[in-house]
Image (cartoon, rainbow, N blue to C red):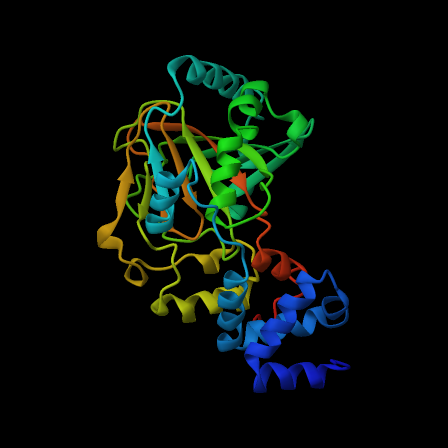
Amino acid sequence: MINNFEDLSNLANNSPQEFVQLLISQYMSENNSLFELFGPEIKSLLQSNQELFWQFWNESERAQLLNCPDDKHQSLLNTLEQDGICIINDFFDKKTIQLLQSEWDNSFKKMPKQDEKTVQKALRSRFTFDFIDGVRYVQSSPFDNKQRILFQEHEKTPSAFSKFILNNTMFSEVAQRHFKLNILPTPSFVMAEYLLNTRVPRQDLFWHIDNLSDQFKVMVILEDMSDIDGPFTFIKGTHKIKCEYKERYHKMYAMNGLSTQAHNHFEPSFTSYKNAEKAVLKAGDIVLFDCKIHHSASFVKKMGSRKNLVLYFNEIPTIRNNIFQKFDHFLNFGLN
């Protein structure tokens, strides 16, 4: 019986496996008393103790349900398990892509015009944000030259985006099997994205993981690409937590919690960047990937551009995610 923080701390320090099993058993029994009483303390212990953090990580993964046998998506799932990413060519036919392109075009006609004031704001904050009629419009400065539209309210999602992407049960089924869930995860939202060439030509990459939580994305390519169109760049197999990642990843958690921040980026030497691949794709191709894969957006060059849609699964209901979320809103105790 845990009556105070001293008991909790002693258990974490002296019997880390027992501490972790207590967290998991409390969650599985739907007993939130431990999290309600000691939420900040639990987060502080995980952020300050790397061994304890990885003990929780591994035990919560082992507690997850197993995949169903003879799954209809087994070949795709095998690729995701091994590589962390799966590219399917010609997933959408030309007629469907034309419908998606039309609604993409109509959506971007509503993008607010940038003036000098908003450009200056983007230069200081990277992005400007406008929330209009339930839709979030995001714009960078010309030095990034990215525009994004987030349909976070599902009822505001354009009909073709809803029909073919948001409500596509195959994507939810793949995410379910990949993360070994017993329920279908609900997609978070669809994002429409437009990348143009930057004011100052860029050759560099920004290697990162999206964040440490279990997340999944599906990217839909809307027009044929070449090497100048900012192809998605990735390194297969890096979604698996290797020993050499652990210290850096724990520092990310100590600084960020689960949120996506600058600490989730790393120098090329941290990863096996020489094995990087570029997804130079065609309209109708899709990319499914685990968001812990090491990846980077390339910058568009010359007069290139990239048009795509991205389906986000931000809140995959794994045991690990659900427990982390019970105390993620508290202060990150790794900050100075």
Q: Name the outermost residue toward the left.
A: 274
Counting from the top left corner in percent of width and height, residue 285 is at 36, 28
Q: Quadrant of the N terminus?
A: bottom right
Q: Nearer the viewer, residue 312 or 123?
A: 312
Residue at 69%, 70% in the rendered image: 40
Counting from the top left corner in percent of width and height, residue 61 is at 51, 61
- Residue 76 seen from this side: yes
Counting from the top left corner in percent of width and height, residue 220 is at 42, 29
Counting from the top left corner in percent of width and height, residue 294 is at 36, 52
Q: Quadrant of the C terminus?
A: bottom right
Q: For residue 303, what is the image quadrant?
A: top left
Query: How many numbered discs sit on the rendered protein?
Result: 0
Q: Name the outermost residue toward the front.
A: 70
Residue at 31%, 31% in the rendered image: 229
- Residue 311 seen from this side: no
Residue at 66%, 66% in the rendered image: 331
Q: For residue 221, what is the image quadrant?
A: top left
Q: Classify 82 as above or below 187.
A: below
Q: Nearer the viewer, residue 281 or 229?
A: 281
Q: Classify 253 as above or below 314.
A: below
Q: Classify 52 as above or below 174.
A: below
Left or right: 331 as drawn, with respect to 226: right
Q: Nearer the viewer, residue 296 or 305?
A: 296
Q: Nearer the viewer, residue 31 or 211?
A: 31
Left or right: 308 as drawn, with respect to 139: left
Residue at 52%, 65% in the rendered image: 253
